[in-house]
Amino acid sequence: HGELPSRQPHPRRTASCLWPSSRAHALQRQPPRAVASCGSQLNTPSRANGGFDDLRGAHHVACIVVPHTKPHPRPRRSVSCLWPSSRLLVLQRLPPRAAIPCGRRLGTLSKAYTPQQVLKLCAHLHEAFTRKDRERFLELTEPLLQHIHLLRPTELAMVLNHLAHLRLRGSALWQNVSEALPGVFVDPDGRALAVAANAYARVMLRHDGALAAIARWARLLAARQVLDGRECALLANGYSKLRLRDDELMELLATRVMEIAPQLGKIDIANIVNAYARLAFPNTQLFAVLRTPILDNMGRFREQHFASIAHGFGRLRERDEVVLERMAGELWRQCDGGRPVAAVFLPSIVHAYAVKLGFVPPDLVRVVEFSLPRVVAQMEGRDLVLTVPSLPLLSGLVPTEDFRRHVFGHCLSALDSLTGFAVVSFLETAARLHHLSDEFWEPALRHCVASIERESWPPRRLASLALAIVEGRNALAGGAPPPFSESAFQAVMSTVAEASLHALEGFELRPLADLATAFAHAGVSDERLNDGLARRAHELLCASTEAEAYSEACREAHDESRLRSALVALGAREPVHD
């Protein structure tokens, strides 16, 4: 009698056929007492041939009797092929006590891949992927879907990875694969889970059933402490990119990461930091533990890793000055070698340091002075919005004429693709950096006038625009001419005044104070606007019901003082408490 093997290579791919032996043989992974008579030697099939389709020496089976009392433990890849024999027929997934009479031959299979050739099918899929042969890969998806329930978790993860990298996002194909995933992913390893999660994130596809199954197994493996650093990083990064917040999973992954922190590589660190930032999932203990591997890998990081780490620290307000200063030093070392920080990475770095964290080491200022004029032309609208308004916050920045010409020249070319708030922020930055070129200001003001006439601007944007224009005029020194003509100035101020009258009820205390201050400093008096400003100020400051609310929550003494001073300067009546 044959002996059942003590452990199979994988419980998913089992055979329900008979292996020939001299007297009897035991079914692989079948319940005890499954025996059959035959008359040949046992020849173990070779998996290199794709399964059981190249066996030698198999002859006859007189009868097979398979009694059992409980179902087979999910045979993943059962065998329904014909061994080279004249009278052997093995049925796939035999029912209880099924008997197969001798004397029948299995005909030639019509399909290109039989269930026993799934390994060969996976090899062919991988070969098509490595050759980037999309047409061949798509052809192979038909037998793949037919036999998908026979795949191992690692093989299905490979398929998902290849689909993602080849950008094959056909809804039907991904839907079928995703629906099969929960049934195939039984006892998967961490690598299969990580690769699958990363594949869904790569194509930004959310399938609730598949991703829930991956998360369920990931929580289990994380709790068992068997995930490695790369697997934790890919899982966290994948779910964060899909904006799927699983608090239990993220907590378990953080615990596991802290246990294996010294083993983390540079890519793992960057992905983990960025993942928790995307989900706005603060974990001070995790970031404290990550300090050591970050410092240890400092010389190995590239600029994309610095950008991810800076963004993560900024988003979660983790102001670790030791880490931040070391990163700025490494970036300056790169610039000092003649290579500027790339346009795709510089914006997130500058915004995180200057705006989110309020920490500006000298090396960061030098990085911006060197890199920005060289790469600004490659920046898109969002990159400019993150970078340019942050410049006044960089203490010690020396914006040379060449620096300002490159930066604001590109801002001007991008105005049509930007929102009104972005345009106003560029004007404010130009005034604060003393960029008083009419080549920038005149077209920018005309753009603002056209935008206000085309769409209704909110009160805060109108007030900011008026202040920016006045600040630009006041930035002049030595009697230099203003950076815009008087006609352009009057046009934009009158447009702002008219739009503000229509939106006056929406002004709160601060934008109202900004607007009044701007018109007072500009020396522009509009009687209708003055009356409207005084009326709205009275409503905000003096009405009994609103005064109580503002005194507790909204009113700031500085804004109120500015508003009252501006109204006096405009000749409007100052609000008096009832």
Image (tube, rainbow, N blue to C red):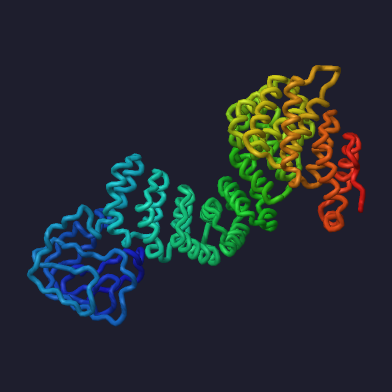
Which of the 4 quarters of the picture holds residue 412?
top right
* Residue nearer the viewer, 32 or 230: 230
Q: Position of residue 16 (x, y in %)?
A: 25, 69
**Relative height, residue 160 to residue 381 (above, below):** below
Q: Along the horizontal axis of the image, is 66 left or right of 182? A: left
Residue 361 visible in rendering: no
Q: Residue at x 47, y 55 (%)?
A: 206
Q: Position of residue 83 (x, y in %)?
A: 16, 62
**Residue farthest along the bottom direction in this orientation:** 69
Residue 54 visible in rendering: yes
* Residue nearer the viewer, 165 or 51: 165
**Relative height, residue 499 to residue 522 (above, below):** below
* Residue nearer the viewer, 403 or 567: 567
Which of the 4 quarters of the picture holds residue 559?
top right
Which of the 4 quarters of the picture holds residue 527?
top right
Number of marks in picture? 0
Q: Along the horizontal axis of the image, is 440 left or right of 153? A: right
